[in-house]
Each structure stands twice: as structure tokens, then as C-alpha cells.
Amino acid sequence: PLRFVPNQVWLDAVKSELPMNTITRLLKHLVPQIEDLAVRNGGMIDELQVMDFIRQTTMVGLLPVPHPIVIRKYQPNKYTCLWFTVFQWGVIFMHNQMVPLFDSSTIKLFIVQTV
């Protein structure tokens, strides 16, 4: 079997599909502040100090507001009712195949009509 080996073309294609705007905005805001923190500590900073700094830093107003959730109510019609009925009977039929509850040669779940 061939092993996957990433190349520059693959990386460029993947990068073009990633939503990097939010991450870039966040990094442009945080990197200078973390570099400042490192300078104040004499150039030495560890992961715990960075994590504490990030926990205490607010991102309010920096990141984009998420889209509102749109709620749509179900509006029944004859097609969805037909689909749901066929689906229900199909599930009932398939779950009872081991037990001879139905004779599969005489059951029709739906009829195809041509005009």
C-alpha cells in the first residue's frame, strides 16, 4: 500500500479551504502581547505563563459574532406524510424479518404509478 506523502500542492489546496480569518485575527492580537510578556520576564516564558495570560485575556469584540440560529417549524404536507408513512412501515417490516410476522412476497410498501 502506498503511504500518503504531503506535498506543496496538497498543502496549498488544504490551506485555501481552511477558515483562517478568525485564527489570524486572534494571533495578530495575542502575539504582540505574549512577546511583551516575554520581554518583561527577561526573555524567559513557559507554557503555564502563556496559558495563564490567555485565560485572563478577553476576546470580546475581537472575534466575529456567530450567525443567529434560524428555527423553522415543521409544516406537514402530503409528500412528507407519505414519505414518513412509507419510512415507518419500512422500518417495521425490516425489524420483523427474523420473525415470520410478514410475508415479504405479498407486501407492497409503495406503488409506482405512471401517468
Image: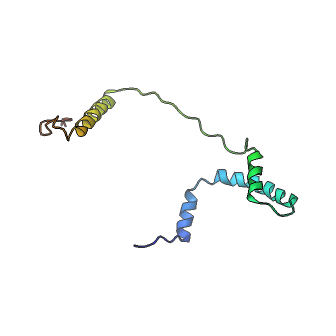
Q: Quick one: 57 or 79, which is closer to the camera?
A: 57
Q: What residue lies at 52% left-to-right and 67% top-to-bottom?
A: 10
Residue 38 in which image quadrant: bottom right
The C terminus sits in image quarter: top left
Residue 98's x, y, as percent?
A: 20, 41
Residue 11 in which image quadrant: bottom right
Residue 113's x, y, as percent?
A: 18, 35
Residue 49 in which image quadrant: bottom right
Q: What residue lies at 86% left-to-right and 59% top-to-bottom?
A: 41
The N terminus sits in image quarter: bottom left
| Left or right: 81 in relation to 113 | right
Residue 94's x, y, as percent?
A: 24, 40
Give the colouring mode of the picture. rainbow
Q: Quick one: 56 or 36, which is closer to the camera?
A: 56
Residue 92's x, y, as percent?
A: 25, 35
Query: How many numbered tags mark residues here?
Result: 0
Q: Is residue 8 above or below residue 81?
A: below
Q: Quick one: 86 or 17, which is closer to the camera?
A: 86
| Left or right: 28 in relation to 21 | right
| Left or right: 82 in relation to 7 | left
Q: Is residue 15 above or below residue 71?
A: below
| Left or right: 36 in relation to 93 | right
